[in-house]
Amino acid sequence: MANPQIEYGYTAIANDIAEALMKINLSAYESRVLWFLFRKTYGWGKKTDWISLSQFSQCIGIDRRLVHRAIKGLSSKKMIVIERDDSGNLRYGFQKDYDKWVLSSKKMTVINRDDRVSSKKMTRLSSKEIPTKTTITKTTITKTIMPDGLSEKTFLEFLAIRNKKRAPLPKESYPRFFKHLQKICDETRASPEEILNQSIINGWQGIFPLKNGGNGNGGNRFGGSKQSAAAKTGRAQSDGEPYPIDHEFS
């Protein structure tokens, strides 16, 4: 049974800061990164500390890329201070002057006692968050032009794979993702459905040319005697995924 005691150490946070934080909505990853920053600074009686992305990732338990996005988000909100020393090392600290925080209504809702924002408007604002497996809807996807021959069901299954790997694909990146998918299809004469199904079956979070060419419309355009693009890239010994391990679209 857990038995935390103040005598074993504590993190001193001013009541004004706690009250300011309880009035804003941050993403789950931003909140976790912020709490880790509190622990590494205020928890040791310091204002700033040298922290690597690997340390963030290991202690919080999320992928480095998600840590980087969360740090970028907190920095854009002016909620953290980032300094670089002469050696290029980064020091992170919390911006305790909450009057300097930049809180965009498009990304979060600020809750005040005299808030006149209606429930309909709050729902509309909250719906702008990055979609997950349960929040992605047909409307969300169809707002972006999907390649011909790709079903929404297959795309949702692929997004579910990325979510399980803690590498969700933000809806803002859908256009770039579909453009990259179409490029692979044009180069290999495979269909978008085939490309995504290959990633789903193998549990890949990236998309790659088919191992054995296209779908019967001439196969690989470079001929059967040539190696497929996937074969040329090689395989990762750990999971069989072609190099590079993933294509980042965010």
Image (cartoon, grey):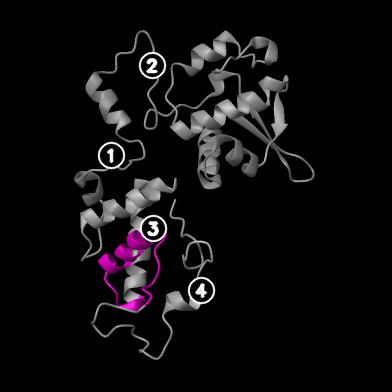
Q: Return the mark for residue 134.
A: 1
**What mark, if any, has residue 203 been given in the picture?**
3
Q: Position of residue 39 (x, y in %)?
A: 63, 24
* Marks 1 and 3, the one that precedes in the sequence: 1
| Residue type at tag 3 | Gly
Q: What amino acid is at disc 4? A: Gly
The answer to whether marks 3 and 2 mark residues whose Cβ atoms lie closer than 8 Å is no
Residue under label 2: 111
In the picture, measured across the screen, residue 160 lies left or right of residue 73, that is left
Q: Which mark is residue 234?
A: 4
Q: CA distance from mark 2 to mark 4?
A: 52 Å
Question: Which mark is nearer the camera, 3 or 2?
Answer: 3
Quadrant containing the N terminus is top right
Instruction: Report the mark closest to the observer, 2 or 1.
Output: 1
Q: Along the line of sight, which residue is nearer the eye, 15 or 102?
A: 15
Disc 1 secondary structure class: loop
